[in-house]
Image (spheres, grey):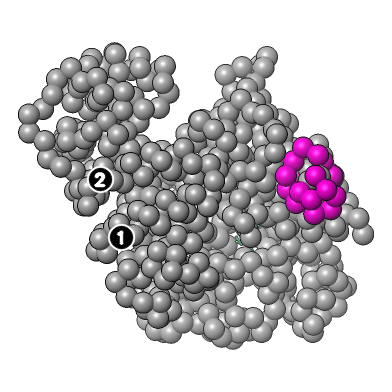
Amino acid sequence: MNFLELAETFAIMEKTTSRLELTDHLVLILKKTPSDIVDKIVYLIQGKLGPDYESSELGIAEKLIIKSLSLVSGHSLNEIQNKYSVIGDLGEVAYNILTNKIQTTLVHQLLTIENVFETLLKIAKVSGTGSLDIKLRFIVSLLNNSSNLEAKFIVKLILGNLRLGIADFTLLDAIALTFTGDKKNRRILERAYNVSSDLGKIALILSKGSIEDIQSISISLFIPIRPMLAERVSNPSEALEKINGVALAEFKIDGERIQIHKKGKRVELFTRSLENVTSNFPDIIKAFDNIETKDLIAEGEVVAINPENNKYLPFQSLMRRRRKYNIQEITAAYPVILNLFDLLYYNGSDKTHVTLLERRKLLAKLFGKQKKSDKIKLIDQINVSRIEEIEIYTEKALKNGCEGIMIKNPGSQYRAGAREWAWMKLKKEYSGEVTDSVDLVVVGALHGKGRRVGKYGALLLASYDAERDVFCTICKVGTGFTDNTLLTITDKLNKHVIKHKHPRVESGNTKMDTWFEPKIVLEIISPEITLSPVYTTAIDRIKPEYGLALRFPKFTGKIREDKSAEDATTVKEIFEIYRDQLK
Ligand code: ATP
C-alpha cells in the first residue's frame, strides 16, 4: 500500500472537526489496508511506531530535519530556518519546500507504508557513535522519495507532532466497525485493550481472525495491564454504603503507581500511563532479586522517602528520579520505597479474577512475613466496618504523610482499565469544606500580558466526558503559577499547538488565542463549583444552557505527567462533587 494514500487521509483528517467524520475516515482507510500491515497503519495513525510500553520513540531534533530538508531541496539552512520562524511547523515547511524544490533527484522509489514504517523504526533504534549521520541518511532517503504531502506527514511523524486528534476510543470504534461491522463490539475490544495495551495488535488479530480470537487475549508478562481506578467519595458513610459490610482500608500514598512484571531474574516496571521506567529504579529492581517466585505481576505505589526518618516525601521529589542520565547519583540522592497493594498474576496464572482478599493473602505470603527487603513493603491495610474506624484510620494516614485512604471491596475482582466503586478514594481535601483537587486538561490559552508576555496568560481547562469521549470546558486558570512553572508549561504546551479548536473539545462560544491538542493535565484546586453559561461541563444537566464551572481555580503546581488527557477528572465526577456540595 502506498504511503501517499495514508498521507492523503491524514490531510483530510487534519481538517476534520467532527468525531463521527473522523471515525468514517478511519474506517475507510482501515478497509483499504491489506491485513498484514493493519497494525502498522494503526500505530502510524496514533503517531507511534508500536504500543506505548515499547517506547520506540524517534526523539529527532528539529535541527536534523532542517538539515535533511536543505540536503533534499537545495535550499540553504538559513532559508529553511527563516521559513520555519514564519510558518511555525516543520511539517508545513517540508510541504512548502518540496513544492518549490531547487534540485530534483532522478531516481524515485515509490514509498510504501512498509518502507516508511521500517525506516522510521530504524531511525528510532539506531544509537551510539555516528548514529546522527545514519539517522540523517535515513531521513534524507525518505524525503528524497516523498511528494510534498508525504514529506509533510513524514516530518510530523518523525517529530512526534502528528496531531490528528484521534483518541483510543475513536480508534476502537473504527476497528470494531471495520472488522466486525458493529460498533457495539467495541466493548469486547476494549477489554482486550485493557489487558494488552496494544491497539495495533488488536486490529491485526481481528483483521486476520475473529472476535473470538480477541476474546481469548489474556494477561501476558512484560505487557502492562491498564490499571484499575478508584471512584471518589467525600465521607466515610458514602463509602460504607457502597460496600455493605466489612471493607479494606489502605493508606493512599502520594507517589507514582508502578506495575511490576517479574519472571526469573528479569524485572520490568511500568507507570500508570504504561511507560517503561525500569531504568529509573535500579534499586527496586535489585530488591526484587531476593523475592523468589517463578513469576508475578504486582502493583504498588513508589514513593520518595527522607532517609533520615523514612517519612514519605511529596510527589515532586519522586519526579527527580525520572531522568535519563546520572541514574546512579540520583538513585542515591532520592531513595524510594515501593508499597505493594495488589497482585494480578502469579505462578503462571491470572489472578485478576480472584477476590481482592485472596490476592492480598498471596501478596502477604510473598512479601509480608520475613522482611526480604526494606525497599519493598506491603501497603498499610486494615479492615473497617464503622464510620469512626474510617475516621481514625484517615487521621493516621494523614499523620503518616499520605494524601488520604483507599477503601476497597474485599470481594472485588481486578478490573483492568475500569473506574468502579470496588475501589474508592477518600482524600483529605474532600472532607474539608473548601478545596478539592481535580485534574484538568489544557485545551486553549490566552496570550500573556505585562510580565507574562511571550508566555500564556490564562489557560482554558476541560474535564473529560468518558461516555462521549470529548473534553468539556470548565474554567480559565491564571493563578498558582510561578514564573518557572509557567515557563515549563508554556514549553510543554507549545508542542501541542493546533490551528483550530480540537475536534474533541466542546467549548461553546469561548474564544481563545491559541488552541491545543488535549494532552497536558494540571492539578487544580477550587473552593466551589458553580453554574455557568460559559462552560460546557455537564451542560444542560442541571439547568438549560448552563454548565458547571470552577470558581477561583488555582494551579497547585503539580503537572500530572503520569496522566493522559483521558485520565483527567470526568464530567461525571465534577457533577457528583457539585451535587455533594449542595447536600
Ligand atoms: P489522584 O488524582 O486522586 O491521585 P488518580 O486520579 O491518579 O488519583 P485514582 O484511580 O483516582 O487515580 O486513584 C488511585 C491512585 O492512587 C492509583 O492510581 C495509585 O497511583 C494511587 N494509590 C495510592 N495508594 C493506593 C492504594 N493503596 N491502592 C490503590 N491505589 C493507590
Is 16 rendered above or below residue 372?
A: above
Disc on res. 504: none
Tell me, yes or no, whether the two marked residues, 2 and 1, touch with CB atoms within 8 Å: no
Is 454 rendered above or below residue 264?
A: above
Relative horizontal placement of residue 95, taking residue 495 as reference (left or right): left
Question: Which x, y percent locates residue 10?
Answer: 37, 42
Q: In this rendered view, identify the residue nearer to me: 390 or 448.
A: 448
Is 175 rendered above or below residue 364?
A: above
**Do we see residue 482 in this rendering?**
no
Q: Quadrant of residue 390?
A: bottom right
For the residue carrying disc 1, how many other residues have a C-alpha within 10 Å: few (<14), some (14-19), or many (20+)? many
Question: Which x, y percent locates residue 252?
Answer: 68, 63
What residue is rendered at 18% in x and 17% in y? 102
Question: Which x, y percent locates residue 248?
Answer: 71, 77
- Looking at the rendered image, the quarter that the C terminus falls into is bottom right
Relative horizontal placement of residue 195, taking residue 65 as reference (left or right): right
What residue is rendered at 41% in x and 53% in y? 26
User: Label 2 sits on what residue type?
Assistant: Phe
User: Is the shortest distance between ligand 1 and the CB of mark 2 under 8 Å?
Assistant: no
Question: Which x, y percent locates residue 578?
Answer: 83, 53
For the residue carrying disc 2, how many other residues have a C-alpha within 10 Å: few (<14), some (14-19), or many (20+)? many
Q: Where is mark 2, residue-wise?
A: 3
Q: In this rendered view, identify the residue nearer to me: 145 or 582.
A: 145
What residue is rendered at 50% in x and 33% in y? 498
* Magenta segment boundaries in residue numbering: 524-545
